[in-house]
Image (spheres, rainbow, N blue to C red):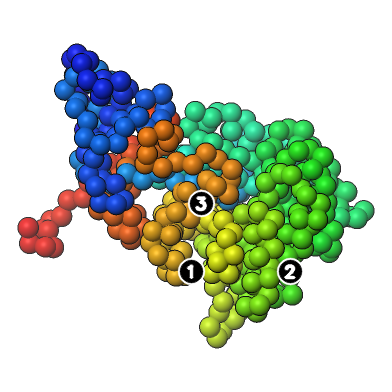
């Protein structure tokens, strides 16, 4: 990509654009220019750059798509795989390892801040302009992790829409849950955007759903729960959550992350729950990397993939998107901090088409998070990513690092790569 100096004069409509992206390849195969003004797309079509007084970026045929979204991260845990090993390699081992590390005071506020900013840097370079991160909010972590992330949210506000979800400890109900509820209250005081939790870890999962809805209702905040992250088909907290949202008329946005057990229930159960989830207006986030890694350990014959019942949910009209979840921590030692990785797994492990998969890490993820839609049309926010690829399918297949990222019309990241061969295997 090259940047041209502004032209002289201003005698045509194109002069009203502050930035023109020249020669962009759209997903439908058109090659065109994109005008941007006041952070929004002001034109899509052939633009005359001669009299243009603003900036011109020549994309030289790079694919331009709406910027990517990470709807489910854990920035407080990110990039700790080498210092917090998971002894059993499953979800219980990861929960235990993380709890021990934080109880031992392993991470102070500066450390959380440093790792969260590095994780966001990787996401930004990949083309992400919106992130929702869960943050552990037990009393012993809330004043380090949540306080750090609230400050990080302010630091990156010009680059990323960052939403923070207070993640309570394993128990939120009864006397044993007092600690978890106190942490949640403190996290709300510190300014989180969403109330979270993991009801299936609670001795009373339905009670934990009610606690989350009650606390969020009082605080007038949305809810995003880790739902049924287990292959036990008896885990039906999602069904209960949907029923309670409908019965109580809970007025804020509700999101259900994971919903693993739904994927191993009977088709009839899937359809019934999916209909309720649609009626309740609950968005669902499937998280392929971490669930492929943590679920079905020890299952020697045809291990389940740990994904949710995507067909039933989509047929019922539920908004479903995909996220990367944990990155290089005890819950997932890998993770590329690139939503195109989750999208690729949606194609390979969940049998979505490449176009559907791309929607799941951009348009659908924005809808689930309650963010304004981004499209390649006049009036849309100019949150865009240009990728050196000929199609969305190829972008997912090769995931080239060479990307240019725009947020509200400002270029916020630009990566170039260069490979030399000696000799070139193709004989060129
Ligand atoms: Zn999670």
The number of discs equals: 3
From the viewer's perspective, is 239 left or right of 81?
Answer: right
Which residue is found at the position 30% from the left and 36% from the top?
44
Work out which quarter of the rendered image holds the C terminus and state it.
bottom left
Measured Cα–Cα span from mark 2 to mark 1: 21 Å
Measured Cα–Cα span from mark 3 to mark 2: 24 Å
Q: Is residue 130 above or below residue 190?
A: below
- Residue 204 image label: none
Image position, residue 411 (x, y; %)? 36, 31
- Residue 236 image label: 2
Measured Cα–Cα span from mark 3 to mark 1: 16 Å
First in residue order: circle 3 vs circle 2: 2
Image position, residue 334 (x, y; %)? 49, 58
Q: Of discs 3 and 1, which sits in the foreground?
A: 3
Q: On the image, numbered disc 3 is attached to which residue?
A: 364
Dot 3 beta carbon under 8 Å from ligand 1: no
From the viewer's perspective, is 51 left or right of 197?
Answer: left
Q: Of discs 3 and 2, which sits in the foreground?
A: 3
Residue closest to the far right: 175
Q: Secondary structure at mark 1?
A: loop
- Residue 350 image label: 1
Which residue is found at the position 47% from the left and 58% from the top?
342
Which residue is found at the position 45% from the left and 41% from the top?
374
Q: Is residue 387 above or below residue 328?
A: above
């Amino acid at each position: 990509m090259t940047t041209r100096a502004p032209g002289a004069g201003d005698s045509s409509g194109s002069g009203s654009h502050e930035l023109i992206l020249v020669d962009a390849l759209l997903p439908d195969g058109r090659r065109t220019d994109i005008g941007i003004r006041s952070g929004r797309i002001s034109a899509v079509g052939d633009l005359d750059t001669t009299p243009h007084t603003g900036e011109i970026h020549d994309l030289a045929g790079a694919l331009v798509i709406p910027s990517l979204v990470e709807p489910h991260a854990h920035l407080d845990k990110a990039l700790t795989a080498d210092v917090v090993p998971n002894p059993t390699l499953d979800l219980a081992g990861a929960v235990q390892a993380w709890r021990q590390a934080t109880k031992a005071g392993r991470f102070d506020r500066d450390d959380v801040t440093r790792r969260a900013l590095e994780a966001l840097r990787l996401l930004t370079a990949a083309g992400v302009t919106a992130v929702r991160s869960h943050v552990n909010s037990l009393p012993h972590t809330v004043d380090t992790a949540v306080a750090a992330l609230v400050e990080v949210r302010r630091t990156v506000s010009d680059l990323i829409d960052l939403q923070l979800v207070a993640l309570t400890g394993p128990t939120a109900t009864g006397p044993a849950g007092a600690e978890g509820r106190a942490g949640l209250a403190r996290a709300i005081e510190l300014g989180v955007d969403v109330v979270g939790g993991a009801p299936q870890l609670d001795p009373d999962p339905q009670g934990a759903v009610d606690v989350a809805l009650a606390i969020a209702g009082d605080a007038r905040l949305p809810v995003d729960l880790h739902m049924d992250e287990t292959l036990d088909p008896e885990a039906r907290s999602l069904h209960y959550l949907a029923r309670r949202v409908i019965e109580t008329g809970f007025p804020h946005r509700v999101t259900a992350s994971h919903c693993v057990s739904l994927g191993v229930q009977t088709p009839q159960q899937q359809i019934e729950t999916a209909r309720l989830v649609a009626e309740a207006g609950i968005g669902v986030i499937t998280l392929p990397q971490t669930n492929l890694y943590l679920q079905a350990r020890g299952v020697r014959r045809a291990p389940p993939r740990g994904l949710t019942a995507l067909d039933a949910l989509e047929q019922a009209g539920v908004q479903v998107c995909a996220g990367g979840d944990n990155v290089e921590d005890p819950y997932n030692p890998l993770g590329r901090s690139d939503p195109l990785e989750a999208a690729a797994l949606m194609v390979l492990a969940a049998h979505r088409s490449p176009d559907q998969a791309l929607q799941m890490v951009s348009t659908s993820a924005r809808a689930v998070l309650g963010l304004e839609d981004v499209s390649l049309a006049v009036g849309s926010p100019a949150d865009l990513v240009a990728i050196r690829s000929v199609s969305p399918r190829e972008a997912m297949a090769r995931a080239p690092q060479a990307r240019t990222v725009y947020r509200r019309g400002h270029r916020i990241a630009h990566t170039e790569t260069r490979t030399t061969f000696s000799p070139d295997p193709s004989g060129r």
